Image (cartoon, rainbow, N blue to C red):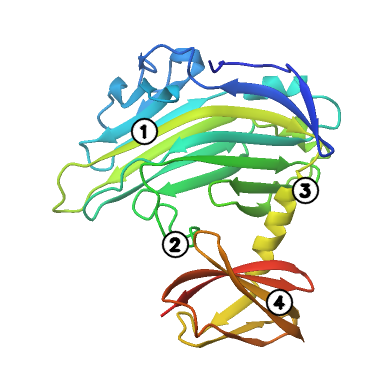
Amino acid sequence: MKKYLLVFITALSFNGIYSQVLYTESFDNHSVGNLGTDVTGKIPGQWGWYTSSFYTQANSFFTIVNEIGRGKVLDLTTGFTDGEMLQAWKTNLHTFMANRAAGNDVIMFEYDFYTGPLLPGNGGGYASIRLYSIGDPNSTINQPEQLINLNFDKKRGFSDVDPNQNPHFNTWVKFVFYFDYPNKKVYIHLPFFNIVTSHDFLKHITSTNLIQDYPLSNIVLDVIVSKGANDPQIYSRNRYDNIKITALNAVPPNIVTLSNNEQLSTKFNLYPNPANNIVNITNSEKMVVQRVTIYDISGKQLNTQSFNNEAEIQLNVENLASGTYMLHLQSNKGLAVKKLVKK
């Protein structure tokens, strides 16, 4: 059975990375039913969670429910009122940071998210997670530092990152964030797609001890929906599970490598795309390509074409069937992955 809270229970070593679990919450020790009794966000509910709904103000929007194969999960479901906004948040998580070992200055935050159904009609909406440092995330004065804000679009889903442009609704996915305090970078990992992106983190802060002055302290879950003028009533279902905070002494090498590959991929251009017979592959930084390996969307390797360290190449795709493919470009700067559509 899942447990609710673990504080400094162990330190694990794998591939030179020391992992120290500081906090977990899987909702199994929570009571089935409403998460809280106060939807104005003044009084905390179960296990310190605050809840707020903008219009309808129903406690039933925030519930602990049983899910087959998972146990208990947190459910945020809204609808009925156009423009409804739900918010659930938890504070003071920075108190667990004091238990981390010296040198464990990379904080890994992970959680499971159920994407819920596609919003019908012409409306829109999203579910987001925001993480903040110490302070009141809902204050309009001296708001704490926002560490990350990640949105899931309830109309487009994951179509921007999935090579098959599948939005993946009604699916459980995992998100993992690595806050690299020493290097002021945050890595966002989607294991579902084996994709990592990285961004600057607290670059404008001059503190010499970022992890102490701006530790992860607040989790904020938001759900917002709106409907089109002629749409029927709509709802948005979102579920959360397995929240976990871990201290590491470094970002795992495979995460850094995936991030570098993702950054490198943006520097290559494919045209025409969609293509019939020949695809031109260029880049503005004169990187040379040694070979291109073609994979279908299931991950099956189809063929490899070698090149003589050329910065601009022409790839023959005449024999490919119509569909979507992933091109692995091996260059002198590393591996880049690009999506190709064959007519």
Q: Which mark is residue 29?
A: none
Q: Amino acid at mark 3?
A: Pro
Q: Measure the C-alpha gap from mark 3 to mark 1.
A: 37 Å
Q: Measure the C-alpha gap from mark 3 to mark 4.
A: 24 Å
Quick check: 143 above or below 189? above
Q: Is residue 17 left or right of residue 232?
A: right
Please name the residue that numbered disc 2 is placed on. 164
Mark 2 or 1 closer to N-term?
1
Please name the residue that numbered disc 3 is placed on. 253
Q: Are marks 3 and 2 in contact (CB under 8 Å)?
A: no
Quick check: 53 above or below 34? below
Quick check: 74 above or below 237? above
Disc 2: CA contacts within 10 A as few (<14), some (14-19) or many (>=20): some
Please name the residue that numbered disc 4 is placed on. 291
The nearer-to-camera label among 2 and 1 is: 2
Q: Is residue 59 left or right of residue 71?
A: left
Question: Where's residue 207, x and y in %?
Answer: 79, 40
Mark 3 or 4 closer to N-term?
3
Q: Amino acid at mark 2?
A: Asn
Please name the residue that numbered disc 1 is placed on. 86
Q: Are marks 3 and 4 in contact (CB under 8 Å)?
A: no
38 and 78: which one is in front?
A: 78
Disc 1: CA contacts within 10 A as few (<14), some (14-19) or many (>=20): many
Disc 4: CA contacts within 10 A as few (<14), some (14-19) or many (>=20): some
Residue 328 seen anywhere in this rendered image of the structure? yes
Q: Measure the C-alpha gap from mark 2 to mark 1.
A: 31 Å
The residue depicted at 59 percent of the width and 43 percent of the height is 148
Q: Secondary structure at mark 1?
A: strand
The nearer-to-camera label among 1 and 4 is: 4
Question: Where's residue 161, x and y in %?
Answer: 50, 58
Q: Amino acid at mark 4?
A: Arg
